[in-house]
């Protein structure tokens, strides 16, 4: 699985590339966690506010693919606003762990569907001090749960 | 004759196993708690916890156990509304769930006969934390509470859902 990596204060976020249509620069302040635009039916989601990281600076907008493959239209789109997309990474699915079962009922599980520890700055696998936590975003689940009003 | 004797020994051993149980006793903020030893996968020194977003305060985050993430719970915060010192962790067996608990220190192993256990009467609707205590026993001049791991998991799940 190929992912985009965005850094937050104490974790990194992995966004599956196959869910992403395009990325654009966006550096304005966002005040709402979720915003519906009645004119174009777009949904704007501030990931820093969703994750309770209000001090994280939004740098990029990430337009998710339309489920109908109609990626030229700018209506009915979901746009994630996140900290800077810093890198891309190829993930081996066997290295991604599902959430502990107890987390399956937490709001956390409405948004993420995997956890793994990534080596930072080329540290060895055994050197825990250079491990960073990476959370795998599940964009389809996130949007689905917003539509069901499980996330507000 | 020898086959009958072997069978009798096996029944005797099984009876001894069924009539008593070993508990891992540990301390948190001056109180003694325990889990049945059969639930315990590992005891380790606390090293590092990776906080997660959107967690209740008693879920500190995840710890890295051989590259697998285990949810780390603070029983001190859950029971006594006070953070536990970050000394050691008890890691449950993976077939229960990938869960670990922060503790002060391990006090010992208690071998307790079933009749020594004081079972806690639970009211299903009480909603207080005594639901999470299955029983208690006397050990080395003190009281030890036996925590119900499955009830903790179930209770946390209900609170958060």
Image (cartoon, rainbow, N blue to C red):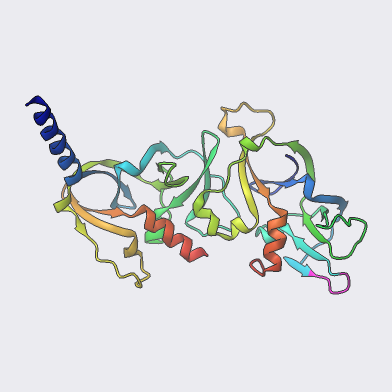
Query: What residue lies at 88% left-to-right and 52% top-to-bottom?
Result: A24
- In the image, residue A112 lies at what x, y percent? 64, 52
Range of magenta residues: A36-40
Q: On the image, which quarter does residue A46 sit in?
A: bottom right
Q: Is residue A54 visible?
A: no
- In the image, residue B100 lies at what x, y percent? 44, 46
Is residue B62 toward the left or the right of residue A135 in the image? left
Is residue A26 toward the left or the right of residue B160 in the image? right
Q: Quadrant of the N terminus of chain A?
A: top right
Is residue A72 toward the left or the right of residue A67 in the image? right
Q: Give B161 or A117, whichever is nearer the viewer.
A: B161
Q: Give B130 or A49, whichever is nearer the viewer.
A: B130
Q: Is residue A98 above or below residue B67?
A: below
Report if residue A39 lies within the magenta region: yes
- In the image, residue A56 lies at what x, y percent? 72, 54
Q: On the image, which quarter does residue B69 sit in?
A: top right
Q: Main secondary structure of the magenta part?
A: loop
Q: Is residue B40 above or below residue B76?
A: above
Q: Quadrant of the C terminus of chain A?
A: bottom right
Query: What residue lies at 56% left-to-right and 27% top-to-bottom?
Result: A126
Q: Is residue B111 visible?
A: yes
Q: Residue furthest left?
A: B1
Report if residue B51 lies within the magenta region: no
- In the image, residue A64 lies at what x, y percent? 81, 55
């Amino acid at each position: 699985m190929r992912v985009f990596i965005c850094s937050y204060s104490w974790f990194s976020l992995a966004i599956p590339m196959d869910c992403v249509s395009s990325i654009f620069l966006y550096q304005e302040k966002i005040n709402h966690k979720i915003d519906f635009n009645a004119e174009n039916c777009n949904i704007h989601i501030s990931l820093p506010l969703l994750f309770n990281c209000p001090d994280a600076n939004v740098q990029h907008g990430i337009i998710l693919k339309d489920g109908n493959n109609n990626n030229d239209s700018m209506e009915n789109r979901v746009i994630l606003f996140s900290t800077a997309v810093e890198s891309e990474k190829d993930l081996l699915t066997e290295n991604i762990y599902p959430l502990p079962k107890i987390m399956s009922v937490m709001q956390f599980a409405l948004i993420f569907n995997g956890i793994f520890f990534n080596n930072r700055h080329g540290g060895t696998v055994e050197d825990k001090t250079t491990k960073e936590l990476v959370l795998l975003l599940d964009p389809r689940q996130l949007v689905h749960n917003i539509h069901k009003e499980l996330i507000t | 004759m020898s086959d009958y004797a072997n069978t009798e020994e096996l029944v005797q051993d099984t009876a001894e196993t069924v009539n008593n149980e070993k508990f891992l006793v540990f301390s948190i903020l001056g109180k003694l708690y325990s889990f049945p030893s059969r639930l315990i996968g590992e005891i380790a020194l606390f090293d590092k916890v990776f906080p997660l977003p959107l967690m209740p305060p008693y879920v500190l985050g995840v710890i890295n156990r051989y590259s697998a993430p285990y949810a780390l719970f603070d029983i001190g915060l859950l029971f006594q509304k006070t953070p536990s010192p970050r000394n050691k962790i008890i890691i449950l067996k993976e077939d229960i769930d990938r869960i670990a608990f922060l503790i002060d220190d391990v006090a010992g192993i208690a071998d307790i006969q079933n009749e020594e256990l004081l079972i806690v009467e639970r009211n299903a609707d009480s909603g207080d934390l005594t639901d999470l205590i299955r029983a208690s026993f006397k050990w080395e001049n003190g009281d030890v509470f036996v925590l119900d791991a499955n009830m903790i998991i179930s209770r946390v799940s209900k609170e958060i859902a």
